[in-house]
Structures are given as structure tokens and as C-alpha cells.
Image (cartoon, rainbow, N blue to C red):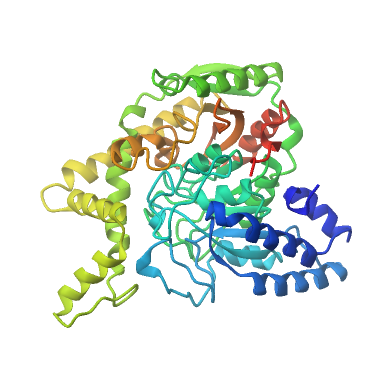
Amino acid sequence: MSLTDLTLRAIQQRLQARELTSVDLTRAFLDRIAAVDGRINAFLTVTGEQALADAALADRRLDEGRGDALTGIPLALKDVFVTEGVRTTCASRILDNFIPPYDGTAVARLKAQGAVLLGKLNMDEFAMGSSNENSGYSPVRNPWNPDYVPGGSSGGSAACVAARMAAATLGTDTGGSIRQPASHCGVVGLKPTYGRVSRYGVVAYASSLDQVGPIARDVEDCAMLLQAVAGHDPADATSVTLPVPDYCAALKDGVKGLKIGLPREYFIEGLDPEVQKALEQAIAALGDAGAEFVQVSLPHTDYAVACYYIISTAEASSNLARYDGVRFGRRVDRGQGLIDMFMQSRAAGFGPEVKRRIMLGTYALSSGYYDAYYLKAQKVRTLIRQDFLDAFDRADVLLTPVAPTPAFKLGEKTADPLQMYLSDIFTIPANLAGTCAMSVPCGVSAEGLPIGLQLIGRPFDEATLLRAGYAFQQTGDWHQRPAPL
């Protein structure tokens, strides 16, 4: 077995037993990146020299018995995380040469544990997209078939793990941007509850929806990475002060007696037959493992996509106003005045999808339309959240599809934004409700493309969510199947 095929847990055990050095491991991952990323385009920046230096430092820590859980383990970051001295672009030309002067909280916590950072990963520009085709630096390709999308917006993060170019990665999820690419790439992706992980140092798309989470080979690796970054941060006003449980401790408790809700609104006509079949087999496997199933209803699901694309675009309009060529971002100045400089800089720096969402959000917030759109969407959001809380009165976790179909071909939906937006129809509601959810591999399509199931948990009950995901993982080997690069 290649070093790059080891799980995060296996790497940790070998490093701490000193059966493996972080330098050798880091070199193996850097060689893997050099060998395969030309076909995938997952990395925007590779920090090879710094990674090897950090690996040598990690080896010294481990030799002295001072290693933490992630010491010496090579990870990579979606290029939305602010990283001191390392270019952070958000896959946008407007931030082409932006080098931050500090680390975001999640990054700082990984570094404090001695993790080795291999580089920054491609994404949909400013995290706006469902296919990673909106990147200003060419799309990421799916490691299972390079003619297909990896999902978005954390497509680079999921493809990187699937292609064995990092032990695990961090992504962000605003409407499904961790779970959907995890499903399409055959890896595990977890969106924690809003407030569980600090957003400080994450370039904002929609501040009330964005959430940081792990993407990894299996559920245990996800639990380990979440453990490292979760917890209160005084620098983030939305970060909660709740204690962080030991996520790995309860993984093996099984699902006997656990009540799993099946929302009737998620099992609909139009669901791809192969996705339907994979989910039915997963439900049967969990039933055999001792889980109990109950029917639940989330009656406001039909309004979720419309609600999301009002709230998220309104917040994007506000958050992206700072990229004007003066405060942040690329400047195009042909000497025709300040307003013209703003217009030229933003026109040249933003891609078409970002411009579309800024315009939608600006309209929704404009005088005379605010109450009709933004305010009404916030009221609908409250109803959607209440639907979930009511469902959790009857069930411990919910089980749904992640996406209506397996991954689709590059270019298949770029001409129809509405069809692209509907790719996230099953993931968006959990963001609006602010609760936790994860994608776990559960099958492969006839074309050889992965299929994931979604588990949704109560707010701040990531432990039960991980326990259910781990139990399902033990019923098969979908998470162990490598992408056929």
C-alpha cells in the first residue's frame, strides 16, 4: 500500500509509533500531487518547500514525545481560508495576488497541532457554485472520470482527498458545498452546526450560512479533523460557547435503537433511479444493523431553494462590496475617475456567476423590494428551521439523498443556472436551519461515479451524526474504493 493510501487515523498511529516520518510522508504526497494534479486541477497553490520544513519540525516534536493528534499529517485547505504569507484567491481573478498577513482560526488550530499544510485548493469563485466550473483558474475534474464535475463549491477539497493528494482537507459549506462534492467524489464530508467551528479568517460568501467542515476518507477521519477545529472562538461573534465532545469516543456505539427519520419530501419523483436504489440498499443495511425508521415531514422544503437564493445573494452583495480595487482586490484604472475605476475593477475581476449573484442580491435588498424578498425569505427560513426541530422530536437523525443525480458532465448545466441551482435542493435546507449534516459514500452508478447518502443531525449533535455514519460505513466498503486514476 502506498503511503498516500493511508487514512488519517493510520497515519497518526504510524507517526506516533515512529514507524514513519512526516518528511517521507510529505514527500510522498507532494510526489502524488506532481503526478496526478495535472489531470485534476485541484491545487491552486502548492507550498512544497514550506511543507517539508514543517514536516521536519513535526518530526522533531514527535521524536521528543510532544506530538498532538495531527502532528506531521499532510492536509490541504480550500482557497477560501486566510493563510499568513500564502496566496489566498477564493479562485477569483480579483484576488489573484492577495497574500494575507494572518491565519484564520481553523488554520491556526491545525498549525497549533503540528499539521503540515500542502497548499490551497481550487473552488467555485467565492464559493458560488455547484460544479467547480465557476473557478477563475479552470474547473476541477472528478478523479473518478475527468469528463465529469467533482461538485462544488469545495470541488478541489473533495477531489484532492479522492485522488489521494492529501490525507484530509477543510472545505466550507454554504448550501451543500462540502456534502455535494463529497458525494460526487466518493469521500466523507461533514457540515457542522452553524457556530460549532469559527468562521474567523474565512472569506465570506453568505455570513449567516457559511460553515467550515472536514472532508476525509472515512467517518473516523472526519471526526478527528472536526475535533481539531471545533470550539468557541472569541474572534467570531457567531461561535458558540458549548463544550466540544470527544467525537471519536462514541463512534463504535452502533445504531441499535437509533431512530432514523425519512423525510417524505426528499424521496421524490425525478430522483435518479440509481440514487434511489443506492439509498434503498443503505436503508436496508442500517435496518439490519438495528436502526429503527420513522416517516417524518419537512413541509416547507419546496421553498428552500428560492429562500436560499434570496438570502445568500443578498449577503453576497453586501460581503463582496469591499472588492473595489481600493480596499481589496485587483485594480483596473484607466484614469477616468473613481466610479469608473470601481466599475472596471469589478467587471474585470469577477466571473459571470459572481456578478449574477451580486446583482440578484442587490435587487433583493433594494428600496421597495426588501420586504417582498429578503424579509419574506427570512420568515420562510424560520419555518424551515422549525420543520427540522419538529422532525427531531421523532427521530435522532434524518436520512436523505445528497444530490438528485450522480456527478454530471462538465458543461452539461452551465447554460441553465436554474438546473445548476437545483443540484443543491437536498442540501440547502440544512444550511437554512443551521443544523449539522454529512455525506457518506453508499454506492456507485453504472458509469462508475460515486453516490452518497446524507445524514442530518440535531443542532450541535455531531456526535450522533458521526456515530450513525460510522455504523453505516461498517456495512460495506464504499468508502474504501479508490478513484481509478
For this view, does 175 lie left or right of residue 101?
left
* Quadrant in the picture for the C terminus: top right
Which x, y percent locates residue 104? 53, 66
Residue nearest the viewer, comparing 245 with 217: 217
In this rendering, the answer to whether 234 lies above or below 358 is below
Residue located 54% across and 77% down the image: 85
Single out the residue that lies furthest toward the left: 368
Towards the viewer: 23 or 434: 23
Is residue 205 shown above or below 459? Answer: below
> Residue 392's spot in the image, x, y percent?
51, 28
**Is residue 81 shown left or right of residue 35?**
left
Q: Residue at x 20, y 52 (%)?
A: 365
| Residue drawn at point x = 69 percent, y = 25 percent | 255
Residue drawn at x 63%, y 64% is 118
**Residue 152 image point, x, y percent:** 45, 46
User: Which residue occupies the extreme bottom position in the image?
Assistant: 335
Residue 479: quarter of image: top right
Residue 231 shows in the view: no
Where is residue 86? Give x, y as percent: 53, 73
| Residue 198 in view, yes or no | yes
